[in-house]
Amino acid sequence: LDSVCFGDKQEEDAITSEILDALSFEDDKVTMELREREKAANLVFTLLDVLKHWLEQETERIHKPSKGKSKRVYRPTSPMGGNAWPVDSSIKKIERLLVRIPFSSCAVAASKVGMHARALQYLEMDGRNKATSSFGANMADQSKEVSKFLKSQFLDGIDLQLTQNMLGQLNDFDTMIFVGQKSHKSDMTRILAEDAAEREMYEDWEGSFQAYERLLDSRLGHEDEGDNVPAQKGLLRSLLKLGRLDSVLNQAYGMSMQGQQETTGICNELLPSAVEAAWRLGKWSVLDKLVNEPSGETSFDADARYQLEFGRTLRNLHSGSTADVGTSLTAARDSIMSSLSCAARVSYAQSYPCLVQLHALREVEEFSSSLGKAGEPDQSLGDVVSSNEWRDRLSTTIPDATGCNAIINSRLAISRLMDDPAIEGEMWLEVGKLSRKGRLYQVAERSLAQADVLFSKSLMKEMNSNTNTNLSTLTSESMGKLKLQFAKLKHAIGESTTALKIIEDEIPTKIFQMNDSELQSFFASGTSEGEEVIGRRILQATEWIVCGGLRGTAEIKNRYQTVLKLVPSWERAHFHFAKYLDSRLSEVGSTIASNKVRHEYLIDSIKHYGMALTLGEKHVYQALPRMLAMWLEFTSQSCSPSDVEGVYESQEQVNKMIESFASKIPEHVFYTALPQLISSVVHENEETSKNVALILRNVLARYPGQAMWSCGWLRFSKNEMKKKAGEEMFALASKKLRRTQNGKLMEGVLNTSKNIFTFFIHLAEFVPKKEQNSVKMKVPAFGTKLTNFVPPIQAALTVSPGVLEGSVTDAFPTFVPRMRAFDRELKIMQSKAKPKKVRVFAVPSRMAQRSSLSDVGDRVDEDIGEMHFLVKKEAKGDLRKDSRVQDLNNVINRLFSSRGSTGPNRRQRLRLQLRTFSVVCLAEDCGILEWVPNTESLRSVISNTFNPQVEATSIHRRGNRLTNFNDADMRNTFLKCQDLYFKKGNLSLATKKFHELILQNYRPVMYWWFVKNFSSPHAWFEARSNFAMSTAVWSAVGHIIGLGDRHSENILIDTTCGECVHVDFDCIFDKGLLLPRPEVIPFRLTPNMVDALGPSGVDGMYTGALIEAMSTLRKNKDTLLSVLEPFLKDPVINLKSSKSSEKYKDSAKDSIAKIEGRLNGVYNLKNPNKKNVKRQDRDGYSNNEDDHANSTQLSVEGQVQKMIMEATSHENLVQVYIGWMPWI
């Protein structure tokens, strides 16, 4: 540093040369180990980071405008103090040094040592630097350059192949494909090589195999055939993944013989693939020869060494050399740890394959240790595989795109080693099942065929031995499962008739005419398979028949009833029968009250939904909301005098059924639908009201700590009937608790909960003095210790997913801390509503009952942290909307988490989720919101960001210029653009001026916030990925439910991880279209948000995540509509606008219809300005204004492209409210 700042040109040249030499590994005369290269490169990168950080900070310190009115005096900083360091000249010299270190050289060096995120960051900076320089050098063609800048296309002039490789290594495949499309090359060999590598990274193994074949064919006859080795290795990898193991060996021998007349073995480069193929095939003599061949193992990479040592391990097991097994296992482990040490520094995803390999080694080691002295296992292989440890290990690992992983492959090898075809067949059956679910149908077909051969072999073996009839029965059951999987595979590939025939042929036709006693005799005879096996076949066939419309209603009902006779306690059968009957309701009549057949279907549907919920909890979010909605709607309907008796009788029957289910369905299941039940606590039907109160009372008594936060607002409702119902509910729940063991404590919590609600309501209603930032509050005595209350936070009030899946017994998490005492300082937020921020000291839940805990509002030693809440009173809105939207978001998160993670669609592995938080209503207009920590608003993030590649004095450098709403010139210019449309009817001119005067002069800077806020390149990439995925998910959900008012203060960014968080959900169901300036876009996707997504803009990870999110939501349409439908009867949803209620009054039912349309692929967001403003121009009046386009059902990809086009359309952005700030 001293030489750079105070040295001459010669010293600067020497330092530059030394840095470049350290980054250029290939020019080193002395060969360096990978770890040494990594250390050298990391040292240089750290040095460059420090210099760059100091340079940027000092530049900002000098040139950033002062916020105050007085002129800012610049005082240079120097670590040496005084004037020892000439800052201005040091800035120039350091800047000159950094310019001489090309980003491209840094990117190449980082890629060679496995620093993929850093390499990608350097490549992106190189592209942006070139684009910025080009912009400055071509001011005459400003329109073109700014347009390029705004679109975030910074790929010109950088190494696109290296960029693709880095994106592939970082699992950003959507952006990788986009970059590949931008690459234009004439070298066919290079094109084929890139195509093969791209397909391999995307796990398209069939495609990569074909690409490598074409590549090798294109290189036939070339003199430099040694360059074929990478392609040969790639081809063998593809064949291994596809399970074509014999082809691997044949190809390996053939490739090794090319150009070598006397070679009979396999060359070292191809040996690891051949070894893996040999042990997976169980060709032990070939394996023995291969593992003894290599002579140059020191040149092998870690993965190659692992394959050799793993092959030796299995060879030693086969030969009975148990003493050598430990040695080869240790060597294999060392090889994995070498790879793991590098991968662990990148990400868990990079480390995952190594961890699976370690588990595979562990299982081989366990199996080896179970072998006796004679080489025979102490227990059967079936017992080992079915042990809890082995079963849990497989259930927690993720198979790759072919349905396999290292654990499955090693188990298959062990089963061949022990000559156990039954176990091997079961494994192949599982692989086939996983491959089918992953839509790898060729792999699935081969796997199932392999299982068929093995099961047949097992049956023959058992028949010859004639010693174990139980094993024969098990194999027969496996054959039945195999046929079912074959049928499902045929159905998946479109051969529905064949699939149905395979199953129907295995079902005794007379079974549908048997009564209960005949069925019992039929199965008691032992001439048929078990009831469950037959029942599963019938149900699967019936579902396909329903989908194809192949039978009449009577026959389908008989089939479902037969299944329930065979397996009466099968949850899935009840659910699908109920769902079928439910679907028939819309076909048998339009009015419930005048149709007896409809009554029958409705009653039976409710009955079977309820039965499904009593037997299991897999379909809770589909069955429970729908069952409750049908019950509440049906019992609220009136009828004509002639139908009174029949309707009331049916309503009474339904109410009796629900009363029965109230005691049979677990309380934690009803808890998931509390908002739906609470909205009907006052009902037109008296018996229905009693049943609602009964269910709520049961839930409140069973889980008082959690349910009180959902039910408590009823006691403070402005509706006297609801208030009375709430008081009665709490009184009866307390009485019920009094009769239970250890219920006295929770009875006290319920009885005193009104005090804590009153306390929070008083805080919400408190009106502080003007300019008051905080006050001291007096915390009253609540009647019971604060630690007895469950805190109103998301983690504590959400039912544990495991309890619905049956894997845990506690309905709610037990680890959540408890509140100990309120901090007496109450912070006043400075927004219009003046919400208050409350701080609560927290202690571990295990300490909650300690009598020695202090309840004084000061920090004590036992505290483990703090909880923060926002208490607010709404002037016009209703926080119950926010609460209901959070409930919906929690259901959506469950849908995302339940997606499959296998198959060729790598988007299924994207981490999609919505950040949710607790919203507890205290009354209709008051509530508590869980504080979302470490967040800043989108506007604040942009305001605090600057672009270091722009001149320090440029107006385009800093983001605070974009967000300064006090800039009268900016405001007036935007309003003039709008006037061109709203007053003169010229949308084309308004859009053009918006682009020229606003977007060109206020360029995005948000990309740099991620670079500056996350100093580690890996953290930078992870944060940007989190932002892209969370923004995409919110875009999808926001569009589906019509979420509006998405101004820059209602979108938050988590500064610790980059995740996007939305707040304020008052404007839902397209209410934004009723605003004075309608919000005519489906979601916010403004220039800065696009800029933050990286060089591909919306065309990379964001679009991929949005497609996956929309696909998931559309596939689960029924579930979402079941959850949303309760809005129909809930007065919370008020779609009226005070200024335009007569013209735009929509019912909740119409809103549900719009949502259903969007879930079917229809873009039905209609712009009201088209009717209100008469356009004078016709340019650009295209099919996006055609009403017919609003009724077209689009594919998921087509719908996503339409949504993005509308969200980023300058025509739409120029129409929104100025306070929305569409330019940032």
Image (cartoon, grey):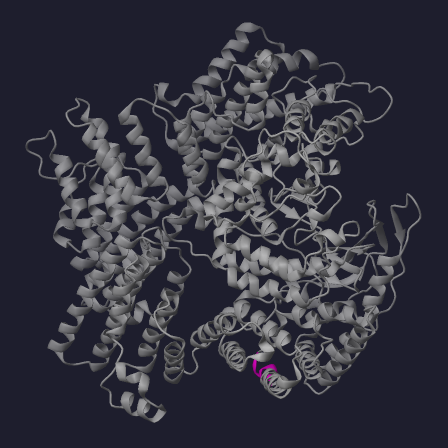
As drawn, 12 above or below 763: above
Q: Position of residue 236 (x, y in %)?
A: 23, 41
Name the magenta segment's main secondary structure.
helix
Classify the position of the N terminus by image quarter: top right
Q: Position of residue 562 (x, y in %)?
A: 37, 82
Is there any visible trace of residue 381 in the rendered image?
A: no
- Pick out the residue farthest to the right: 769
Is there any visible trace of residue 339 in the rendered image?
A: yes
Q: Nearer the viewer, residue 1078 or 399?
A: 1078
Residue 994 lies left or right of residue 346; in this view the side is: right
Classify the position of the C terminus by image quarter: top right
Q: Quadrant of residue 53?
A: top right
Q: Nearer the viewer, residue 822 or 1039?
A: 1039
As drawn, 1112 above or below 620: above
As drawn, 1186 above or below 916: above
Q: Position of residue 854 (x, y in %)?
A: 80, 65
Q: Which residues lie in the magenta part?
A: 660-665
Q: Position of residue 596 (x, y in %)?
A: 54, 82
Residue 1197 lies left or right of residue 1121; in this view the side is: left
As drawn, 738 above or below 1077: below
Q: Nearer the viewer, residue 189 or 621?
A: 621
Q: Is residue 43 magenta?
A: no
- Pick out the residue farthest to the left: 262
